[in-house]
């Protein structure tokens, strides 16, 4: 039994589809509302809430492998519940900032979760992805309303990753040998700036999408209301304010692990075009 947490999210939903398509099973998807979850036929939907680790006990019953996104609840309690349930292997989604921006608060928290997992005695695989292509969804409302997309650091090019590539690496780690005790830094196949991302979305839509670069201070004021001060500072540092050259590196980890090339941003834009129409 494999339990996929965050099963309706960008990574979890793609992971369930990949596992199901390859005949892997039995599969179980964790969601807060099983009645509303739409999973592939044969995938068991189970309810649980990271904020209440005790609610995860039924979901973990009989589970051999666990896919876990960090920092969505009390990771110490979640990992202890998994250990007590007899889970043998955990694939954890962390962040590449653990190695590129270790001084930032969120990166330090991710590092702490990685260490917690290593101390449980369960086998582990750690995935450290860079910026998600799906972060572009924050522009969806502006693009739908034909407004100008505004973003800071317009010319900073990061190797943005398609969430489905994270899922593909997780699928291999969960089902094939040789991945226990491994940490994988994951990126997309090419660097792409915020301006180029908007241009890719515009090309898919077949119309112009106006773009304007704004200052860090302007961006910070917008983001604080959503993320809080520390998280806003961290996001802005990572996306251009304090760029470590290591963050800009394109890695071939996705293709090496999965034997399939990483998906470019334009593919993500094409697959999600309806969200911007």
Image (cartoon, rainbow, N blue to C red):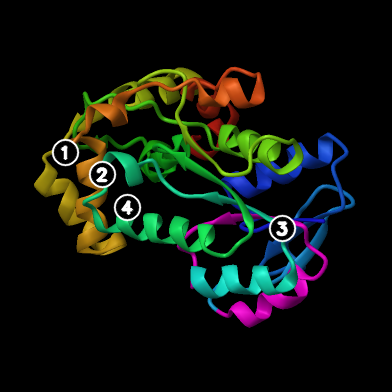
Q: Marks 1 and 4, Cα distance to the nearest angstrom?
A: 14 Å
Question: Can you identify the residue that label 4 sits on?
Answer: 107
Q: Say whether marks 3 and 1 touch (CB < 8 Å).
A: no
Q: Marks 3 and 1, Cα distance to the nearest angstrom?
A: 38 Å
Q: Marks 4 and 2, Cα distance to the nearest angstrom?
A: 7 Å
Q: Say whether marks 1 and 2 touch (CB < 8 Å).
A: yes
Q: Determine the residue positioned at 78% across, 40% down.
A: 19
Badge 4 density bin: few <14, some 14–19, many ≥20, Cα 10 Å: many
**Labels 3, 1: front one:** 3
Decide which of tag 4 and tag 2 comes sooner along the chain.
2
Q: Say whether marks 4 and 2 touch (CB < 8 Å).
A: yes
Question: Can you identify the residue that label 3 sits on?
Answer: 88
In the displayed structure, does residue 187 sit left or right of residue 24?
left
Is residue 122 depicted above or below 131 in this figure?
below
Mark 1 falls on what kind of element? loop
Is residue 43 depicted above or below 23 in this figure?
below
**Labels 3, 2: front one:** 3
Question: Can you identify the residue that label 2 sits on?
Answer: 101
């Amino acid at each position: 039994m494999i339990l996929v947490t965050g099963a309706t999210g960008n990574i979890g939903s793609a992971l369930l589809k990949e596992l199901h398509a390859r005949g892997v099973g039995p599969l179980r998807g964790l969601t807060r509302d099983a009645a509303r979850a739409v999973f592939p036929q044969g995938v068991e939907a189970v309810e649980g809430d990271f904020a209440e680790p005790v609610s995860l006990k039924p979901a973990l019953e009989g589970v051999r492998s666990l896919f876990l996104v960090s920092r969505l609840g009390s990771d110490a309690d979640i990992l202890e519940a998994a250990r007590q349930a007899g889970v043998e292997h955990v694939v954890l989604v962390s962040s590449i900032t653990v190695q590129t921006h270790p001084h930032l608060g969120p990166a330090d928290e991710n590092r702490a979760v990685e260490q917690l997992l290593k101390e449980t005695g369960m086998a582990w695989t750690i995935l450290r992805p860079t910026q998600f292509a799906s972060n572009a969804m924050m522009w969806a409302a502006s693009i739908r309303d034909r407004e100008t997309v505004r973003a800071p650091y317009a010319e900073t090019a990061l190797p943005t990753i398609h969430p489905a590539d994270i899922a593909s690496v997780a699928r291999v780690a969960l089902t094939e040998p040789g991945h226990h005790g491994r940490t994988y830094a994951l990126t997309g196949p090419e660097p792409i700036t915020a301006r180029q991302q908007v241009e890719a979305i515009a090309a898919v839509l077949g119309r112009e999408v106006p773009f304007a670069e704004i200052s860090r201070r302007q961006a910070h004021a917008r983001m604080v209301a959503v993320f809080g001060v520390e998280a806003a500072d961290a996001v802005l540092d990572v996306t251009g304010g304090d760029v470590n050259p290591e963050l800009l590196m394109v890695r071939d980890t996705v293709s090496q692990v999965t034997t399939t090339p990483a998906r470019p941003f334009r593919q993500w834009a094409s697959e999600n075009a309806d969200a911007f129409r």
